[in-house]
Amino acid sequence: MWWQIHNLEAKIKHRRTLQTCARCGFYYPKIETSCHHCFEMSDEDVLRNLAQKKYFRVGLGKSMLLGALFILLIMYLF
Ligand SMILES: [Zn+2]
């Protein structure tokens, strides 16, 4: 739909004003000199946060897979 495309264009435009932080991997505006996500964190904190994020993603993937298997099982039974 046209409003979604317009929204997507706005998102892409917004994305072009951002850059990826080398330390934490989040996006921050290009006009800022330092990343506002991790500039006040030590390297240790940043690493710990990244590990937590990775762990969360793995957990989410596993639960999605279980949900898909569950739905397949229900579709097979009925
Ligand atoms: Zn950062």
Image (spheres, rainbow, N blue to C red):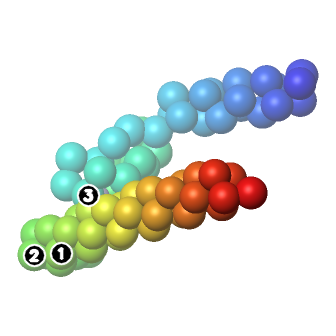
Left or right, residue 73 beside residue 31: right
Q: Secondary structure at mark 2?
A: helix
Q: Which mark is residue 24?
A: 3
Q: Amino acid at mark 1?
A: Arg
Q: Position of residue 47 (x, y in %)?
A: 15, 68
Q: Secondary structure at mark 3?
A: loop
Mark 2 within 8 Å of ligand 1, using the beta carbon: no
The residue labelled by disc 2 is 44
Q: Residue furthest left?
A: 44
Q: What distance separates the C-alpha of mark 3 from that of mark 2?
A: 11 Å
| Nearest the eye: 5 or 61 | 61
The quarter holding residue 78 reads bottom right
Q: Amino acid at mark 3?
A: Cys
Q: Position of residue 15 (x, y in %)?
A: 54, 34
Q: Do we see residue 37 in this rendering?
A: no
| Image height of 25 relative to 66, above or below | above
Q: Position of residue 9 (x, y in %)?
A: 71, 24
Q: Confirm or deny contact between disc 1 and disc 2 (CB under 8 A).
A: yes
Q: Ligand 1 quadrant?
A: bottom left
Which is more foreground, mark 1 or mark 3? 1
Q: What distance separates the C-alpha of mark 1 from that of mark 3?
A: 10 Å
Q: Which mark is residue 48?
A: 1
Mark 1 within 8 Å of ligand 1, using the beta carbon: no
